[in-house]
Image (cartoon, rainbow, N blue to C red):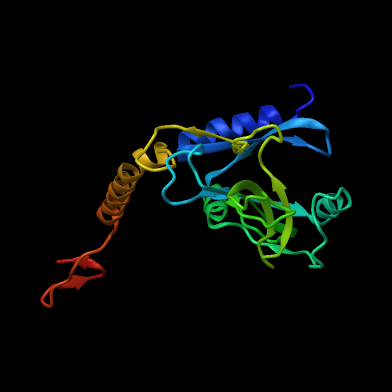
Amino acid sequence: VNKMPEFQSDSERALFAQGVIGSVFKRVYYNSVTEVPTSACVFPDQLVVNSTAKDLERAERISYEFIVSEDRFQELVDEGLFVDHGEDPYDIELAPFQEKINSLLGISQTQYDVGYQIVEQHINLILPSPFGDPEERYRPYIVYVDKKSSKVLGVYKNWDEEDTKFKRRDHFVHYPFIVGFGFYGYGYAHLLGNIQVTLTAVMRSLVDSGQFANMQGGFKLKNFKVVDNSPI
């Protein structure tokens, strides 16, 4: 843990998000730059599975979206993990989920990050020989794609070489707060959301009623007589 400085902060962030939005993920992998295992926090808007999946173990497709800077992307190319697809870095716009969080926190974005949006897909594919299985059957792979240009950056096998059953290696862990009917869990935002909307409407009605009650105003009849601003 001492060699993983992000572990504590990411774990605290994950525990908070788990209770509020219902689901949070951890991506466990070996970081080739720091040369230590990494356990990174992943929010639900960054990870998408096929619509019929009930859990990660039975998901046929797992798509994880992340952002890399121009420098980091060049490091991955130099290390041979990505191919240079010849695209210039571009402005990274916030996802709707992050924009909503920023609006609740009162944060406004004045400048966009520049880099690449990468989609890491864990999927079963049939690759022709000599790249894939000689029997041309579906095997688990990890495919990296640049989201904007849709160009493939890398394809990697996702099973152990000695595994004759070609079982997929899992890199994500799901932490649901309350298990729901579908893949994602429920949090306090789902359980208390409608109640909070009702309470907000009631509070606004009370404030409006108090303002109208304290407002000085009224009606004056046509036969109402006033002398020196005083009623007779």
In the displayed structure, does residue 217 sit left or right of residue 53?
left
Dividing the picture into quarters, in which one does residue 180 lie? top left
- Quadrant showing the N terminus: top right
The extreme right residue here reads 78
Query: Toward the viewer: 225 or 15?
Result: 15
Number of on-image labels = 0
The extreme front residue here reads 135
Q: Relative to 168, does residue 112 appear above or below in the rendering?
A: below
Which residue is drawn at the image coordinates 53% and 37% (left, top)?
Answer: 24
Residue 32 screen position, x and y as percent: 81, 38
Which residue is drawn at the image coordinates 69% and 68% (left, top)?
Answer: 149
Which residue is drawn at the image coordinates 75% and 34% (left, top)?
Answer: 30
Residue 212 screen position, x and y as percent: 27, 56
The extreme bottom residue here reads 222
Residue 23 screen position, x and y as percent: 49, 38
- Quadrant showing the C terminus: bottom left
Q: Relative to 228, does residue 2 appear above or below in the rendering?
A: above
Query: Toward the viewer: 14 or 63?
Result: 63
The extreme left residue here reads 223
In the displayed structure, does residue 200 sit left or right of residue 89?
left
Residue 202 screen position, x and y as percent: 28, 47
